[in-house]
Image (spheres, helix red, strand yellow):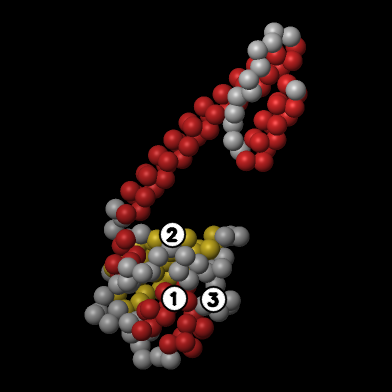
Amino acid sequence: RPLKRLRASIDKITREGIRETVQWDSQDELGQLVRAFNELQAQQSAQAVEEEKRLKFQTEIMEITLEHMDQGISMIDSNQVFTAFNRKFAELFQLPGSFKVGATMKDFIRHNAKAGMYGNVDIEETVERLTSSDRQFKTRQLERTRSDGTVIEIRINSVENWGQVSTYTDI
């Protein structure tokens, strides 16, 4: 029985990541093994809590930093899906509140084309041209002028095996 309980706990940890204490009161070798197992569980749980606190703190610092930058910043993955962007990015491109992380580069370019950022163009042709694979993930710098005359400097930086990070500055 004690070995079955110990094995069941190990299986639960492996399968579900749930940490639990095995109840066993004997002082024999098996009892010592169960106590060592429980101590290891407690130690790992404490380490997991500390790591979670550290990651939460780092995430908060990054979010505060990104939201207080004078530049817009965005990150897209290798599938041209936005994985992050800050408030300034959304402001510079006058993005609607419905534009969220998970939107695609095609969504972004379509929005800009409808806003006249590329001039009087065929919107879908522009979307396809600007998201074509030969343009993807090449480090470059360019400028775009909004219809209100605001000029935005765009610096696109390729991130190998990942996607790209871009910064946007109102110049």
Q: Which of marks 1 and 2 precedes in the sequence?
A: 2
Q: Residue at x 47, y 60 (%)?
A: 83
Q: Describe the element under mark 2 as helix, strand or loop.
A: strand
Q: Residue at x 45, y 69 (%)?
A: 103
Graded by Cα atoms within 10 Å as few (under 14), some (14 to 19) or many (20 or more), the crowding at tag 1 reads some
Q: Is residue 19 above or below residue 85?
A: above
Are dots 1 and 3 in contact, CB under 8 Å? Answer: no
Quadrant for the C terminus, please. Answer: bottom left
Circle 1 is placed at which residue position? 107
Q: Mark 2 belongs to which amino acid?
A: Ala
Query: What x and y, as percent, mark residue 141?
Result: 43, 70
Q: Is residue 71 above or below residue 7?
A: below
Graded by Cα atoms within 10 Å as few (under 14), some (14 to 19) or many (20 or more), the crowding at tag 2 reads some
Graded by Cα atoms within 10 Å as few (under 14), some (14 to 19) or many (20 or more), the crowding at tag 3 reads few
Q: Describe the element under mark 1 as helix, strand or loop.
A: helix
Q: Residue at x 61, y 38 (%)?
A: 17
Circle 3 is placed at which residue position? 135
Q: Nearer the viewer, residue 152 or 120?
A: 120
Q: Nearer the viewer, mark 2 or mark 3?
A: 2
Inter-mark Cα distance, 2 to 1: 15 Å
Quadrant for the N terminus, please. Answer: top right
Q: Mark 1 belongs to which amino acid?
A: Asp
Q: Mark 3 belongs to which amino acid?
A: Arg
Inter-mark Cα distance, 2 to 3: 20 Å
Inter-mark Cα distance, 1 to 3: 16 Å
Query: What x and y, as percent, mark residue 127?
Result: 47, 82
Q: Residue at x 36, y 59 (%)?
A: 86
Q: Which of marks 3 and 2 precedes in the sequence?
A: 2
Circle 2 is placed at which residue position? 84
Query: What x and y, as percent, mark residue 118?
Result: 38, 84
